[in-house]
């Protein structure tokens, strides 16, 4: 059994030196190159969690993506509290309650993009400039 495991590309770590410490741990590499820990000796091949994820994604596509995404709607924060909000599909909401009769009768509410992120990157590039000028002084 052990021979078959090794022939399939598996390998055994006698003593792990990093957490979680264990002995004789069976490993095998996923086709993408990632190590998978604690593989059964009968395993012919393994898939790491990432590849399992991407396989699931291929299988269920958009449905899966929507489940995983934190904010799939594209609606702004606080849209529940707006007197009237129209999403990009034309669904109309009054204080967060859908109004099916009004669907498609109004223009989608324009969502203002957040500018905070941009400011941050500007700060970062400024820091880089300052750092560089320091380095020049050192030389
Ligand atoms: Zn993988």
Image: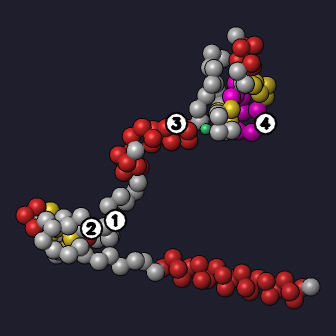
Give the percent coordinates (x, y) of residue 100. 10, 61
Task: Name the residue carrying label 4.
Answer: 17
Task: Name the residue carrying label 2.
Answer: 88
Q: Which residue is depicted at the point 74% across and 86% down?
A: 130
Which quadrant of the figure contains the N terminus? Answer: top right
Instruction: Determine the image quadrant of residue 132.
Output: bottom right
Is residue 138 left or right of 30 when viewed as pictured? right
- Is residue 27 part of the magenta span, yes or no? yes
Q: Dot 2, how many residues are within 10 Å of its Cα: few (below 14), some (14-19), or many (20+)?
A: some
Badge count: 4
Mark 1 touching mark 2, by CB under 8 A?
yes
* Disc 1 residue lies near ligand 1 with CB under 8 A: no
Mark earlier in primary sequence (2, 4): 4
SS state under label 4: loop
Task: Name the residue carrying label 1.
Answer: 74
Distance CA(mark 3)–CA(mark 2): 33 Å
Give the percent coordinates (x, y) of residue 38. 64, 27
SS state under label 2: loop
Q: Which residues are magenta?
A: 16-28
Identify the residue at the far right of this view: 139
Mark earlier in primary sequence (4, 1): 4
Eye-nearest disc, 4 or 3: 3
Is residue 5 left or right of 83 when viewed as pictured? right
């Amino acid at each position: 059994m052990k021979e078959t495991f090794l022939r399939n590309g598996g390998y055994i770590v006698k003593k792990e030196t990093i957490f979680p410490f264990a002995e004789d741990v069976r490993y095998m590499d996923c086709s993408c190159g990632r190590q998978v820990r604690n593989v059964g000796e009968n395993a012919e091949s393994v898939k790491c969690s990432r590849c399992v994820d991407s396989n699931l994604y291929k299988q269920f596509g958009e449905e899966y993506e929507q489940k995983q995404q934190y904010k799939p709607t594209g609606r702004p924060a606080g849209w529940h509290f707006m007197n009237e909000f129209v999403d990009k599909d034309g669904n109309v909401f009054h204080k967060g309650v859908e109004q099916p009769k009004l669907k498609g009768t109004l223009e989608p509410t324009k969502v203002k993009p957040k500018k905070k992120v941009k400011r941050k990157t500007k700060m970062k590039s400024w820091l880089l400039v300052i750092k560089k000028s320091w380095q020049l002084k050192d030389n």
